[in-house]
Amino acid sequence: MEKRVALVTGASSGIGKATAIALNQAGYVVNGVARRVALMDDLEELGIKTLAMDVTDEKVMKTQVEKILATEGRIDVLVNNAGYGSYGAVEDVSIAEARRQFEVNIFGLARLTQLVLPSMREHQFGKIVNISSMGGRMWTPYGAWYHASKFALEGFSNSMRIEVAPFGIDVILIEPGAIKTQWGLIAADNFEEASSHGAYATAAKTKAANLRNLYQNGKLTAPEVIANKIVKAVTVRRPRTHYLVGYGAKPAVAFKNIFGDRLFDWLIQKIM
């Protein structure tokens, strides 16, 4: 059987890099894309193809997808992993930054999906894996724009799943908990930059420090765990629609579902 072809965004680090490696080991032809190509040199050494791509640049996305299709003839698996967390008080975060959060976490993802779908429909096969978060099913203070983007991704994915199912295409949501990557440290930096002055300054300092402490915790889930879950999801005949996995994910969502919003608000405020 001809090898399946995968496209993984955000492949320069964390979950994206681990997923590109895991799919390569599983026998896929893997194309890893990211803004910082130099950080993917180690993937090239493993036989993974790497390309420069910024998911907010439609022209580049179109060019690179066309290049992959011209070379491989198809794209069977799309892992939409590129994203980041914009933290800060709603009052402090600029609308320009809020738009950027959605451009990266939603609109870029959606446009890339549009570019890949025709090939999947033509071959009557496809696996679209959208990396959401437990933050698409619960919330934290000062993360309004990040959570909004992930809640949006959940609704987007659930609706699209029904649309594309007749063409043999699955849409799969991966909802990681706290993962041992740079995500939390970057979010903490964004938090301090947005809210280090004014009415929320004290909270910003304390909660950014807590976020950094959390993401330096040795108990966090390794990105390889998420990567292996993704490989499983794209290789089984009938994947689950949602995979809630990683440190804190299942307990946090279960607590919110069982005890309701007010108790969850109290708990998450204490934790952060």
Image: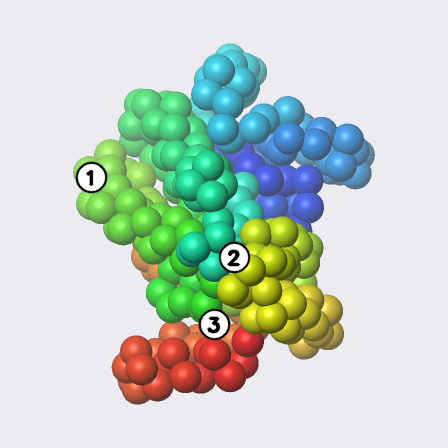
Q: Is residue 94 visible?
A: yes
Q: Position of residue 139 (x, y in %)?
A: 41, 67
Q: Answer left or right for 204 relative to 258.
A: right
Q: Answer left or right for 128 relative to 215.
A: left
Q: Which mark is residue 249?
A: 3
- Mark 3 burial class by Cα count in 10 Å: few <14, some 14-19, many 20+: some
Q: Earlier in the sequence, mark 2 or mark 3?
A: 2
Q: Which residue is mark 1?
A: 163
- Mark 2 burial class by Cα count in 10 Å: few <14, some 14-19, many 20+: many
Q: Which residue is mark 2?
A: 88
Q: Position of residue 18 (x, y in %)?
A: 65, 50
Q: CA distance from mark 3 to mark 1?
A: 28 Å
Which part of the image, by quadrant, shows the C terminus? Answer: bottom right
Q: CA distance from mark 2 to mark 3?
A: 22 Å
* The one of 256 and 113 positioned closer to us in this rendering: 256
Q: Amino acid at mark 2?
A: Gly
Q: Residue at x 55, y 60 (%)?
A: 198
Q: Nearer the viewer, mark 2 or mark 3?
A: 2
Q: Which mark is residue 25?
A: none
Q: Is residue 47 visible?
A: no
Snapshot quadrant of residue 47: top right
* The one of 183 and 128 positioned closer to us in this rendering: 183
Label 2 close to label 1 by CB (< 8 Å) = no
Q: Residue at x 55, y 48 (%)?
A: 84
